[in-house]
Each structure stands twice: as C-alpha cells, then as structure tokens.
Image (cartoon, coloured by chain):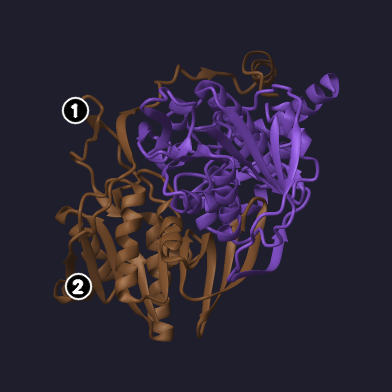
Chain colours: A brown, B purple
Amino acid sequence: MKILVCISHVPDTTSKINFTENDSKFDSNGVQFVINPYDEFALTRAMWFKEKQGASVTVVNVGSSATEPTLRKALAIGADDAIRVNAEPLDGFFVAKQLAEVAKNGSYDLVLAGKESIDYNGGMVPGMMSAILDCNFVTACVGLEIEGSSATITREIDGGKETLSADLPLVIGGQKGLVEEKDLRIPNMRGIMMARKKPLNIVEPVDFEPTTTTVSFEKPEAKGACTMIDAGNLDELISLLHNEAKVI
Amino acid sequence: MSVLVYAESSEGKYKKVAFEATSYGKQVADQLGVDLHVLTIGGENPSELGAYGASNIISVNNVTNNSDAKVVANVIKETANNKGATVIIIDSSANGLSITPLVAVNLNAGLATNVVAVPSSTTPFVVKRKAFSNKAFNSTQISSDVKVIGLAKNSFGILENKVEASVESFDATIISSGITSTSLDKSTGTVTIADAETVVSGGRGLKGPENWGMIEELATVLGAATACSKPVSDLGWRPHNEHVGQTGKPVSSNLYIAIGISGAIQHLAGINASKVKVVINTDPEAPFFKAADYGIVGDAFEVVPSLIEKLKAFKAQNA
C-alpha cells in the first residue's frame, strides 16, 4: 500500500498571531513552525500502517524551501521520502490542485491529511483533492483500518459517530482519534540522522490560477475587562447573566 | 443569477445551522438583488424554512446515501446549474463541512469557509472569515464567477423573516457511491457541543473524573452540553469528543462556563467564538480571567454546588 500524507507547515499552537504591511501579511517573525497538529495524527496513523502492514509513506507539502525543516521532521518521525511542491500556497484550491497532481503521478492508494490546518482553518484541501481525483472521501475521521483494498472508517458526525466502509483509493481528513495524543512521536537522534539521507524531491507546480486572495487581516476586538464577582454572591452572577448578558 | 442555500436536515429535521444559513442567504440575495433558492434533501417540512426568508424551496427526496459527500455535492451542483446560482451557501454541520469543498471543485468555484458576515463588498466580492483558530479574521476576495461560502456556526445568527414559501419537488441525479454506512452511534437525549446554546466545561482543577457529577448537574440545570480541556481528555478523565480548544471541538455557544480551567492560549482559541464567558478558578492570576466576561475567584467544590442550587431556584421562579 502506498500512502501519501499531506503536511501543512503552520505556526505552533502557542504562537501569538501578528500581521505586517498594513495588516495584509502574516508576520512570521519569531514564530516557530510545526507540522499541523491534525496532519500529525494522520502521519502517526500512516506510520502504524508502515510498521504493521508494510505500507510505504511519502510526505508532501506545498511551500517554499522554508518549509523543508517541517518535512525533515516528518522524515525523522519515519516517513520514507518527501516531496515539496515548490510554490507559495496561494489558496486552498491551488494547494489541492498541486497535491492532487502529486497523488495522481504517484498512484497512491491512500491519501491522509488533517481535516484542516490550524492557520487558515479552511478545511477544504482534502475534500477538494478527492473531487479533483474523483475518489472516495471521508473527513473528521477518528478511526481507520485497511484490509486489502477496503477501508473501515469511523467519522464524527453531529452528536455521534458513524462507521463507513469504502474502497481504496481514498482521501481521508483526519483528527485526534485516528491515533491518540500519547501515540504521537518525538523524533529520536537516530531518526533525525536518517532523515538527512532520505530523499526530499522538489517538484515544480502545475499552472493554476487561484480563485481567492486575502485582502486584509484583523485581530478580534480587544475585550473589555472581566467583571469580577464575589464567590459568596452568586445571585449577582445569575442576575448579570440574566439581565445584562441575556444568556440565561 | 441567484443565491442557493443548502439547508441540511438530520433525520428529516432542520437544525439551527439550516435556519442560520437560510437567514444569511436571504440577506446576501437581497444585497445582490437576486432570487434566493433553498435546497433541502429529505426534510420533512420544507416550508418551515419560509420563516427565515426562503420563498423558493427545492425539495429533493430521492437521496438515500447521505453519508457520501460526493453524492450530496452532486445534487447541489445540479441544482445550482438548474437555477443559475452564482453564490452557493452551505452550513458548518458535520456533513456541510464535508460537502462544501466538493461543491467548489464541481462548480470550479472559489471557496471561502468559516465565513462570519455578509459580504463587505459584492464587486469585488469580499467576505470576512475566521482564521488562525479564532485568533484572527481575514477578509477574502473571491474572484471566480461562481462562489461557494461555508458559513461558520452561530456567527451570523438566525433572522426571522416570514415569507410565502413555494416548494418544488425534484428528483436529483444520484451518482454511484463507493461509501456505505455500516453503523451509527448517536448519543440521544444529551445536547451536543456543536448545537448547545450553553457549554459547561471542566479542567484539571477538578482533580479527577469522579468529580464530574457536579459539572453534569450544572449542565442539566442549564440545558447545556458538557466539555473539557485538553489535559482532561489526554488523562482519560473524559472522552475525546468533549475536548474543546484549538485542536479539539470549536465552541461558539452563547454562554461558556469554564470551571478549573486556567485558559491556555490553545484553549482560549477554541472557545473564543462563544459570546459570553464565565470563569471559575481558585487562581486569580489564571490567564482565563483576561478572556472572560465574568469571573469568580473561588473553589469550584464550593462555588459550583451553590451555583446549582441558586440556578434551580432561579429557573423555578422564571419558568
């Protein structure tokens, strides 16, 4: 089984988000970049398929050379090889188009990605890839087993879970549950050394005109001060929630 | 030209998100000066949508496999083409989120998801959306002829706007599906985090899973869903589907009550979209107090039981 894991290079979850150039660009100054947490669950599940079922695992990212440390980290975790599509990720449709091209050229059986990235939160790339490739698609996936060419998938739905069966090829949008938090791996020294020698192939993008552009960014309005209420005066809290906030 | 809203139903019933998407679609259609069409698949009482401005309703009843996004996306595409829709609006229910990107590819349309407001301008077409896991917004310009919008939950709100609704039944083309649903596990009787008006959330300050009784009781009194912070779900005190925060479930309820949660930046990102936040914590320096609207410095084991009693009395009085 050939698995392609899509890796987004995103600001660490603890990052303070700032913008520059008149709020038109994300300010990456002082920001630590990591593997998108949702993608990390997908990658860790892919490692399980590699170790238990002999799958091969390729990681892919659309980005400039600045994203290579993130791909190397995925290699250090255990992926076999990496592909970087040499282009700025202009919008979700553009990225999906590039990734679909890589998936098609490599004839992968399974494409795993996080259900969304924690930067733009578009939640669109896996679904768009599946539509471009015309293959099966399940997102918000919290469980995945593969037997031969068929998959058993558990996904979150509103108010519960649903189990599905589907044939490969398949695109999955994953999240926690695919593996647990404790299963996530920190690369060890041997992994890091080996990652240096693993292939990281650079491919040029296919032509595709982006259909959206970010005009400007803004931060949420600064919040007013918190109204402090004495622990012995809960009637006041109830009265404020009822009369002022009107939420009870 | 027209605007098409897909109003999701579950077991024949509409959820809040369907009414919100319809309310939003009505406003966008008015702004563009075009007709609004609302598509519903398997809804039992489509004319209900008329209360939110849906005058033209297209009711499709021949879809049997709602679990395959591809099948539903094709029905939306077909309807959009039939009605000459240039703006397609889809809600953020679990199925909505899964269908939206497929519809955009099918219609070769630019897509903006997580949208929180009507277009700030229609030429060029610019919408505001949430980004960086609620830490920021960005204004996105969609430049394609056909545009797809994924509407964020509880962002625009539900606007009553009663109109005479005409319902047209339509047999959609059903494409073959490679996905079969084999089992469904839905919790019944409890409010889900996604749908809840109020969410009561507990953190590590509660010391152990055995202390969740009071959280559940407070939630019951308020008709709320229960949730928890990431450490609590990582420790296995509560199930993962209760984890709210940046990498857990997003919360956009009207009222969010955090008990024994310090308010790490990742947690705050996930619950930021909630309208009113109440925090109960023993530590007056907890970062959550900076993000909250109402704060109580106190021991949850004293405050919560007392709050439950007082709320019961309040509810009895205001029933």
Which structural element holds mark 2?
helix
Q: State whether residue A80 is above or below residue A175.
A: below
Q: Nearer the viewer, residue A194 or A238?
A: A194
- Expressed as whole percent of the image width and height from the top left, the position of residue A193 reads 16, 74
Q: Residue at x 18, y 60 (%)?
A: A68
Q: Residue furthest top?
A: A243
Q: Are marks 1 and 2 in contact (CB under 8 Å)?
A: no
For label 1, the residue is A21
In the image: residue B161, left or right of residue B280: right
For label 2, the residue is A195
- Expressed as whole percent of the image width and height from the top left, the position of residue A131 reads 45, 60
Q: Nearer the viewer, residue B158 or B269?
A: B158
Report the chain holding disc 1.
Answer: A
Measured in 3D between alpha carbons, the distance from the residue under mark 1 to the one under mark 2, in whole angstroms, is: 36 Å
Report the chain holding disc 2.
Answer: A
Q: State whether residue A153 is above or below residue A218.
A: below
Locate residue A150: give its quadrant.
bottom right
Is residue A47 in view from this perspective? Answer: yes
Q: Residue at x 52, y 71 (%)?
A: A144
The amino acid type of the residue labelled 2 equals Ala
Q: State whether residue A229 is above or below residue B172.
A: above
Q: Residue at x 30, y 30 (%)?
A: A215
